[in-house]
Image (cartoon, grey):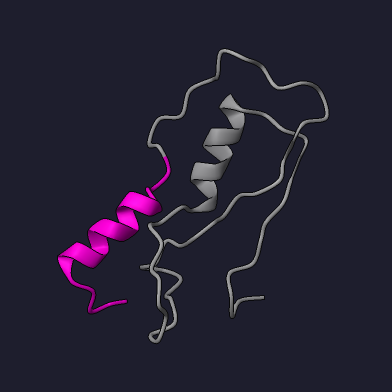
Amino acid sequence: MTDASPAQRDLVTLFCPPPHPSPRAPVLRLPEGSCDSHCHVFGPAARIPYAPDRTFTPPDAPVGQLRRMLVQNPVEFFGFPSVPGQA
């Protein structure tokens, strides 16, 4: 999606916004043993390039942002789904 039009990039951002830059603790604390059953880690694309024939380019969501989010929203377990074509 390297040659995506501005409208296509806007749609990707609308349906797949980047991680919040400053996550904060929720009012409701998660119970002990909580599990986030779905999270993604992408990029940074400048260091870990995407396949040139991809149909989707997600915003960067590197592991450091996940760690910052987990400080505010701690869980004991979480799952990483794979992206099609990735192991």
Residue plotted at (71% across, 46% down): 37
Q: Is residue 49 magenta?
A: no
Residue plotted at (40% across, 56% down): 60
As drawn, the residue found furthest toward the bottom would be 53
Query: Which quadrant of the structure image shows residue 22?
Result: top left
Say which of 20 and 37 sits in front: 37
Residue 17's spot in the image, x, y percent? 37, 48
Residue plotted at (55% across, 43% down): 66
Q: What segment carries the magenta color?
A: 1-19
As drawn, the residue found furthest toward the left would be 6
Whether 40 is drawn above or below 45: the answer is above
**78 sits to left or right of 5:** right
Name the image quarter holding the N terminus: bottom left
Whether 31 is drawn above or below 17: the answer is above
Residue 84's spot in the image, x, y percent? 58, 75
Whether 45 is drawn above or below 87: the answer is above
As drawn, the residue found furthest toward the top would be 27
